[in-house]
Image (cartoon, rainbow, N blue to C red):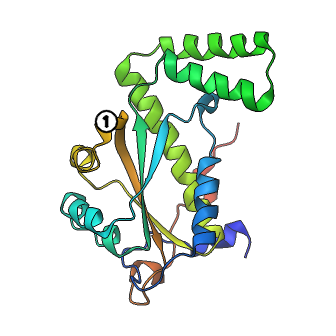
Amino acid sequence: MDLRENLNWRAAVKKFDSSRKISHEDLQKLLDCLNLSPSSMGLQPYRFLHIKSKEIREKLLPFSFGQPQVVDASDFIVLASHTQINNEYIQKYADLLEQERNLAPEFKEAFLNSAKGYLSLMDQDQKMKWAAHQVYLASGVLLCTAASMQIDACPLEGFVNEKYNEILDLKSYHLHAELCVALGYRDPSDVISSLKKVRIPLDQMLIEF
């Protein structure tokens, strides 16, 4: 199937087959593609948490409104925005750019000035919203990659962010839980995946100028 067919196939699966696990090779591909997601200025103001521990997933369940995907899916990813996007963070990324691209000093300086100047226009709340937007860009890449591999993925916004932060000790990493994605394979009894996909027709969605 091409990507369009795969996206028509995908569904926000609510019931995963807990006996089926994603292979190490496929999981690595999913994570590699997630890390290749676009982000503003390439700064990647987020981190990905792969929650492997069954015990931790069970602790998260009550603060996920009891959604069974948290514990039943093969893998569970928490996407967290970075809460300290400051000059030090930008400098570290600029150093990485210099190392990987062998940047001339003037190009590195130009990047630093541009990034620092852009972020200096934001207060902390605005930076957090900006970082959250980048998380959603990354989640879209993960969902599309999973669909292309015929792996089910369900994004979850319904959870108590601060409780996730507490259980995962995210404040010590300067992170804030924004979004989760459950990955695995649908159970045959999952109702959602058997329903026809419904979208507003493209000719009503698309506005051309």
> What amino acid does circle 1 point to?
Ser
How packed mark 1 is, by other alpha carbons closer than 10 Å (few <14, some 14-19, many 20 or more), is few
Q: Is residue 193 above or below residue 27?
A: below
208 and 27: which one is in front? 27
Furthest-left residue in this view: 62
Where residue 43 appears, x then y in whole percent?
Answer: 58, 30
Locate residue 50: give its quadrant. Answer: bottom left
Q: Residue at x 46, y 33 (%)?
A: 131
Q: What residue appears at the point 29 percent right and 56 percent down from the top-left corner?
A: 158
For the residue pair 188 and 76, the one nearer the viewer reads as 76
Q: Quadrant of the N terminus?
A: bottom right
Residue labelled with disc 1: 172
Mark 1 element type: helix
Left of 5 or right of it: where is 45? left
Give the answer, above or below, for where 13 lies relative to 165: below
- Residue closest to the eye, 197 or 31: 31
- Check the image and report above or below for 73 versus 109: below
Q: Is residue 7 visible?
A: no
Furthest residue toward bottom: 188
Q: Is residue 206 visible?
A: yes
Question: x, y percentage for residue 135?
Answer: 48, 43
- Say how many tags the image has: 1
